[in-house]
Image (tube, rainbow, N blue to C red):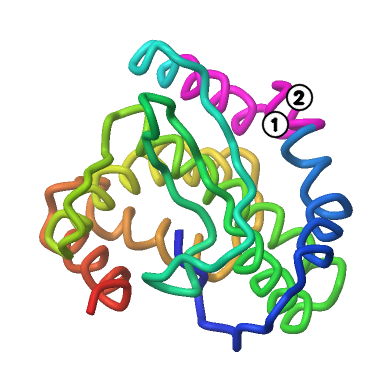
Amino acid sequence: MPAPVAPAPKPRSEAELKEFWAKRMKRTFEDELLNYRYPIAEINERYVFLARKIEERYQKKLQVSMVSTFNPASKQIMAGPMIKNGIPIVELIVPALVNNHGWLVEQHGEKLGEELFEISTIVGFIHELDHLAYGYVSEDRSLDSLVELERLAWAQTCEYTLRPLVEKDAVRLGESERIYYLAWINGGRNPDSPAWRKFIMDAYAHTRK
């Protein structure tokens, strides 16, 4: 999932990245979400559903890995799905998460920035699970293939994660998530609508040269 803007990347040491994970990410993922204890019921229920669906599809449990280098396609990419030796994996790209965290705190202040970062990271993670659960993964690196997979995966994320957060829980979304939610609503909640296709194309064109 790309960040809403491109904060200037800053070099981070391995120790700094591990410290960020321990202080900011461990509770959210290791202590709460991955143990089915996330405090927002809709997020917790969606994670349980997708994790089970992923295990049924691949006959192996989901693995989550921490990556200490930027994605070569774009320094804005904060997470990504992959299948390695038949194992479904979500990679969390920690230097991109660190940059997004710093940018949100700088723009919105510590309290709101932390809240927006939490939601942004969780939504991004659930989005990668949507890719894996529904088989929206491919070795084809072309823009056309990417847009096809993303329009389908984001349709799932918008309908079953962002809509409940906004319409049931009244959660405040960050800029990026709000843009996706509005594009989905404006596209008639139809993954085949021309408006939705164009939105996804525009959102991901920068990741392919």
Q: Could you tell me how far apart the alpha carbons at marks 2 and 1 are, in whole angstroms? A: 5 Å
Residue 126 shown left or right of residue 94 in the figure? left
Where residue 164 sits: x, y (%)? 53, 38
Asked whether 51 falls inside the magenta stretch, the response is yes
Q: Residue at x 17, y 52 (%)?
A: 140
Residue on which disc 2 sits:
37
Q: Which SS does the magenta portion mostly show?
A: helix
* Magenta span includes 79: no
Up/down of 43 relative to 1, above or below? above
Side of 71 relative to 100 (left or right): left
Residue sitting at x 60%, y 88%: 8
Q: Amino acid at mark 1?
A: Leu
Q: Residue at 51% x, 80% y: name it.
A: 5
Tally of numbered discs:
2
Name the amino acid, label 2: Arg
Examine the rendered structure and indicate whether residue 120 appears above or below residue 38: below
| Whether residue 158 is situated above or below residue 45 in the rendered picture | below
The residue under label 1 is 33
Decide: marks 2, 1 in contact (CB < 8 A)? yes
Residue for point 15% across, 54% down: 145
- Seen from the viewer's position, the closer of residues 84 and 202 is 84
Residue numbers of the magenta segment: 31-52
Quarter of the image for the C terminus: give it. Answer: bottom left
In this view, which residue lies farthest toward the bottom? 8
Q: Position of residue 205 (x, y in %)?
A: 25, 74
Taking 121 as reference, is 61 left or right? left
* Mark 2 burial class by Cα count in 10 Å: few <14, some 14-19, many 20+: some
Residue 83 % position (x, y): 37, 34
Local SS, label 1: helix
